[in-house]
Image (spheres, coloured by chain):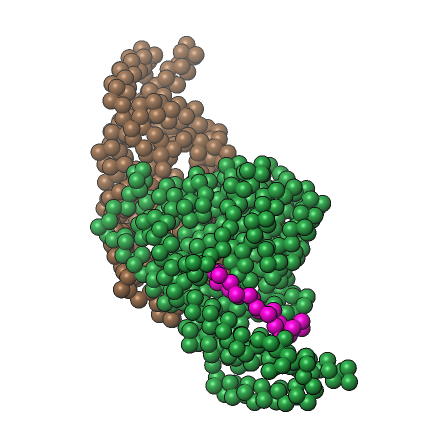
Chain colours: A green, B brown
């Protein structure tokens, strides 16, 4: 089939009529499919059920250093868990704090603390007339919701295939001391699934922010989430790079096992410099006596070591790889050559991004919803939920079964074609 | 033996010489005993080991309503856990949010949120020139550390055998709109082990605070922690009482299973009015996707229902009751009639309070430390760690074995006698 733009009004009208007939048939099926969130599927969750057996009533819940995991204490986490997540995050265990079940919660608290107490002695952000964050776009909606909640002005920075537009990032942070942070998902990014290039990471580590309390919020959520054994993205470790660049305190790095074991029952971690660590602990020691050490021990005993995590992630990949590939196949089969959108084909992570014709994203999502397929709301990948082009759509292939995913994607491409045909037809009729 | 105050200088000098000889012998034993914190003993922790078996790899981790506890979601907690803690807290499950492992963390976050966003639309506390809290004294050091961390001015309010001095509380909160809260441990209080009387609770529910964003921080940490089956304190349920009094939004009520199952691996909860709940959820939904539901389910399956918790607490009581009684026996045996201090004899909770002669508490604690016995630092039970009388000492009998506790208390009473004798002797010599 030729590109919609090259079709005559008659051809397009005919195409649209045929598509709408198909859509009516789909609606009649009364589907209920959800690919809105980056949730693991049941099959993936089953992979971690063995974790329920590693601690029994007969188990010794004592750490190597003698800590009884059942009692109070160990604010920064048990040594074994810091070592395991140190290997996972490629950081020194001493630079790591193990938290509770949610790295999002750690990010929220980090920003909240900056508001109430400032960072390393600087003015608390709540005392400043304005606080701004750079937001690579499209990006992760829950990041943007946190900054919005705190009234932080969000400045979109375009993403490129190698990461955020670093010329713009460098310029903005060096000029404006109201810019206090930037949200980054540096590996298999949400929603594109791209990874920052070596040059991007090096330039991040060498930023010269006007604000001394500027921090990079480095959410390495998908560090272990490769789809392929033989074809993987590699990311320069940011803390080490910052240290080498003479900027040791520039980064807060976040990770968790939420998408490794159980979302909601994993363990989260923060890695940062000794100065930042000391600053954080002045607050954390008043916030809690310690996080869930039994769950930390459960993770350590389940995986044994980093090789255990790698093997475990391979099993995840075996489940979700066919889903990512199915999405790409259906998009290619139904849309290739039509000129109605582009999409990413990531090597890992939880998402793919579809870029529709400008002005079509909301319509596509709404149309899919009316046919029983729930997709992440259009605009969600932008600060304040406003995509100025109305074109980005996040695709989350992991949660549905392969069968449901295929059904949902068939609806999706149909909706893309209808929206695009309508838009182009309207333009052609206007021209005429 | 007659009261020290009635002894002659000669008698006292002789007594002191004998005590100091004993102290030297004790020091020679090089003890290492810790009764500084309210931690459960190993024997108590063993009571909950069965909780490690209730969820296995073969278990169905699905809730009654179909929620898969392993995946994301359920911001307010799973229904079963809200019901169980509803029964425990004597509140409607709908008024309860189940959090992570630490009620202290919930309290910290509640105050932090009030600073950054205010309470139910009122001015964020960070924008106010001054924020004050009432602090019943002696009280819980970790409460005071939170308010101190946020720069809140703490106003001590004396505790009486029926709770805080309510005349003073009523006067202060009605006059000063900078007073935004009061810390309460209403049942088996930390450190006295007393429970608020019916009248006290009724007066709390009928407070007329000048600040509409004033809240009672009702930390019901020991609601289930009776030492005796047949002799228990009863506390009027505060939320219901506030509702009856037409003040439904006056209270945040906190509880947890930290001292029921495992400290650090329990579940915490907040109960409050629908208005407060709505206000809290506007923040919580940005802070986390949800707390650890697997651990919530683990608790529910372990206890079954509230009767399961009651039976479990009976076992705790059997372990710690002899410790509380031993402390009282040793204090009575060694100090009764000497006029060197008074102490509480609670029916539950985790602490007893010893009231030394003014000016002696720090000396007693330092002296005990030099003999290898660690006690909660004197002053810790007061805001800013400053006990103006230098007389309150918190005794935490639960953590040591009964044998160690007896050894530690023998040292303690010896130190009380030495400090008191020295003080009285000095006064007598000054008079002479």
Does the magenta-highlighted stretch encompass residue B281?
no
Does the magenta-highlighted stretch encompass residue A354?
yes
Query: Could you tell me if residue A75 is visible in this image?
Result: no
Q: In the image, what residue occupies the spot 38% across and 43% down?
A: A83
Q: In the image, what residue occupies the spot 45% across and 43% down?
A: A91
Residue B167 position within the rendered picture, expressed as x and y whole percent measured from the top left = 51, 44
Q: Which quadrant is the C terminus of chain A positioned in?
A: bottom right
Query: Could you tell me if residue A268 is visible in this image?
Result: yes
Q: In the image, what residue occupies the spot 69% across and 49% down?
A: A172
The answer to which image quadrant residue A141 occupies is bottom right
Q: Which residues are magenta?
A: A340-363
The answer to which image quadrant residue B194 occupies is top left
The answer to which image quadrant residue B59 occupies is bottom left
Residue B360 position within the rendered picture, expressed as x and y whole percent measured from the top left = 40, 24
Which is nearer the eye, B143 or B156? B143
Which is nearer the eye, B130 or A155? A155
In the rendered structure, the answer to whether residue A246 lies left or right of residue A57 reads right
In the rendered structure, the answer to whether residue B67 lies left or right of residue A387 reads left
Residue A35 position within the rendered picture, expressed as x and y whole percent measured from the top left = 49, 71
Q: How many marks?
A: 0
Q: In the image, what residue occupies the spot 38% across and 65% down?
A: A318
Q: Which quadrant is the N terminus of chain A positioned in?
A: bottom right
Q: Vertically, is A291 above or below A422?
A: above
| Residue found farthest to the right | A432
Q: Vertically, is B70 above or below B37?
A: below
Residue B126 position within the rendered picture, expressed as x and y whole percent measured from the top left = 62, 46
């Amino acid at each position: 089939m030729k590109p919609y733009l090259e079709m005559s009004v008659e051809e397009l009208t005919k195409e649209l009529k045929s598509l709408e007939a198909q859509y009516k048939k789909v609606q009649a099926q009364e589907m209920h499919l959800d690919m809105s969130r980056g949730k693991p599927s049941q099959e993936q969750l089953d992979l971690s059920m063995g974790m329920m057996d590693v601690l029994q009533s007969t188990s010794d819940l004592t750490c190597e250093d003698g800590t009884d995991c059942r009692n109070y204490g160990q604010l920064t986490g048990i040594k074994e868990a810091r070592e395991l997540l140190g290997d996972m995050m490629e950081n020194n265990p001493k630079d790591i704090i193990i938290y509770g079940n949610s790295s999002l919660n750690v990010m929220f608290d980090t920003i909240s603390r900056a508001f109430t107490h400032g960072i390393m002695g600087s003015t608390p952000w709540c005392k400043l007339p304005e606080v701004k964050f750079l937001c690579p776009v499209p990006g992760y909606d829950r990041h943007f919701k946190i900054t919005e909640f705190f009234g932080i002005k969000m400045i979109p920075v375009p993403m490129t295939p190698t990461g955020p537009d670093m010329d713009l990032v460098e310029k903005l942070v060096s000029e404006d001391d109201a810019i206090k942070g930037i949200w980054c998902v540096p590996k298999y990014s949400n929603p594109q699934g791209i990874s920052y290039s070596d040059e991007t990471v090096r330039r991040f580590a060498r930023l010269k922010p006007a604000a001394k309390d500027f921090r990079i919020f480095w959410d390495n959520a998908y560090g272990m989430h490769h789809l392929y054994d033989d074809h993987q993205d590699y990311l320069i470790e940011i803390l080490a790079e910052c240290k080498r660049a003479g900027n040791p305190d520039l980064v807060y790095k976040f990770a968790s096992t939420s998408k490794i074991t159980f979302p909601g029952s994993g363990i989260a971690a923060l890695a940062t410099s000794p100065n930042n660590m000391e600053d954080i602990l002045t607050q954390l020691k008043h916030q809690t006596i310690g996080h869930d050490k039994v769950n930390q021990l459960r993770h350590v005993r389940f995986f044994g070591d980093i090789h255990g995590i790698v093997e475990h992630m391979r099993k995840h990949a075996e489940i979700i790889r066919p889903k990512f590939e199915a999405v790409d196949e259906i998009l290619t089969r139904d849309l290739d050559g039509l000129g109605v959108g582009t999409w990413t084909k990531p090597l890992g992570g939880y998402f793919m991004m579809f870029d529709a014709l400008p002005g079509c994203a909301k319509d596509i999502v709404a149309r899919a919803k009316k046919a029983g397929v729930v997709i992440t709301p259009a605009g969600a990948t932008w600060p304040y939920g406003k995509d100025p082009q109305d074109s980005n759509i996040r695709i989350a292939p992991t949660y549905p079964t392969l069968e449901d995913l295929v059904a949902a994607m068939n609806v999706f491409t149909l909706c893309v074609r209808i929206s695009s045909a309508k838009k182009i037809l309207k333009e052609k009729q206007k021209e005429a």
